[in-house]
Amino acid sequence: NAQTYYNDDADLKYLSDKTVAIIGYGSQGHAHALNLKESGIDVVVGLREGSSSQEEAEKAGLKVVDTAAAAKEGDIVMILIPDQYQAQVYEESIKPNLEEGNVLAFAHGFNIHFGQIQPEEDVDVFMVAPKSPGHLVRRVYTKGSGVPCLIAIEQDYTGTAKDTALAYTKALGGTRAGVLETTFEEETETDLFGEQAVLCGGASELVKQGFEVLVEAGYQPEIAYFECLHELKLIVDLMYEGGIERMYYSVSDTAEYGGLTRGPKVVDASTKERMKEVLKQVQDQTFADEWIQENKDGIPNLKSLRNDLGEHKIEKVGKQLRSMMDWIEKDEDEVVEAAE
Ligand code: NDP
Ligand code: MG
Ligand code: MG
């Protein structure tokens, strides 16, 4: 089983005479920069010229400089811009400014694992990956708690890479909730598989096709929307709180029996075989190569898929129904509370 680390396993002294450069001020970037700063760490934010995030970062009291200057000033350089732009920004602005014994850090393993960024040998390379969207990383921290994080050590030039990674995770709030150690390979492959087969890809196709079956059978789209999409949140919340058993305990016996007998007919052994194919394409780099090429081409397929989805009836019906449910926005607070 995985080794878990908590507050007592991490010591902020490994960051005490260091400057942490946070590159990017988006979902993860703002959370890392602000949490570290409030943990007493010296933070500088690195952004490109004319960045739309600059004003917000400065308003929050952070020092903002251009990416190259931040990389130069930082002893630890955490890259928190979208994965598909990291290799270019690394080559142009970060690599020339890394000194011997510095740390190059990531929140996801894609670029290191798939060889898009090949760091010099005289730096430490580690990952601190919060298992949560950035806005939760921030809000949970401000309430005195933290979100679980993964750490991984790819290069340990200084001999203190793991101590520094744990200190970083503590400053981020992660050791309050628990930190698991993994590798860049495991984090990257499981993260890609999870979002493709289950979380983003699998779940949304299940919802869409369930909706289509009901609408094609003549039922009202609004009713189909509530049954197949809206109620999913309630079911997932129950699983999150107490596992699949807890969910089945809370629904009616009819739903429990129907789900346990019909579910495996919908998602069956052939689905599992196709999931294995998805995993294989992650492992053998087919997916990574395709995604890198897609970006070089200017994301034509992604644009057309986004457009198709926007045209789907479930999206049009949902937009209309949600505009009447003004309480939906507030749910973010419940998510934060559930994570605490
Ligand atoms: P975001 O999309 O939120 O990053 C936006 C920031 O990156 C902005 O400051 C933006 O500045 C800057 N940026 C965008 N494009 C460029 C570019 N070409 N050059 C320079 N700066 C640029 O990223 P995320 O926070 O979602 O992801 C950051 C990392 O964290 C990724 O490695 C991701 O895999 C990982 N991660 C993300 C999670 C999440 O919840 N989103 C969860 C766990 C890990 P500008 O205003 O100039 O565009
Ligand atoms: Mg991911
Ligand atoms: Mg029902």
Image (cartoon, rainbow, N blue to C red):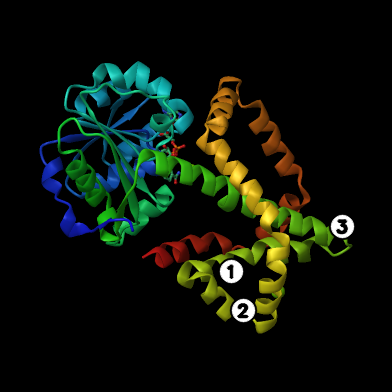
Marks 3/1: CA distance?
25 Å
Q: Distance between the residues labelled 2 and 1?
A: 9 Å
Q: Residue furthest right?
A: 218
Horizontally, residue 233 falls left or right of residue 12, namely right
Task: Name the residue: 52% across, 49% down.
Answer: 194
- Residue labelled with disc 2: 251
Contact between marks 2 and 1 (CB within 8 A): the answer is: yes
The image quarter containing residue 264 is bottom right
Q: Which one is earlier in the sequence, the residue at label 2 or at label 1? A: 1
Could one spot residue 201 in this view of the protein? no
The amino acid at mark 3 is: Glu
- The quarter of the image holding the C terminus is bottom left
In the picture provided, is 39 more to the left or to the right than 277? left
Query: Which residue ends up furthest to the bottom in the rendered image?
Result: 253
Q: How far apart are marks 3 and 2 (CA)?
A: 27 Å
Q: Which amino acid does label 1 sit on?
A: Ile
The residue under the point 40% across, 52% down is: 131
Q: Is mark 1 on a helix, strand or loop?
A: helix
Q: Mark 1 points at which residue?
A: 235
Which residue is painted at 19% across and 21% down in the image? 99
Quadrant of the picture in which ligand 3 is shown:
bottom right
Q: Which of marks 3 and 1 is nearer the N terminus?
A: 3
Give the quadrant of residue 234.
Answer: bottom right
Q: Is mark 1 within 8 Å of ligand 3?
A: no
Location of mark 3 (residue) = 216
On screen, residue 234 above or below 294: below
Provide residue 154's location: percent of width, then percent of height. Answer: 29, 35
Residue 284 relative to residue 113: left or right: right
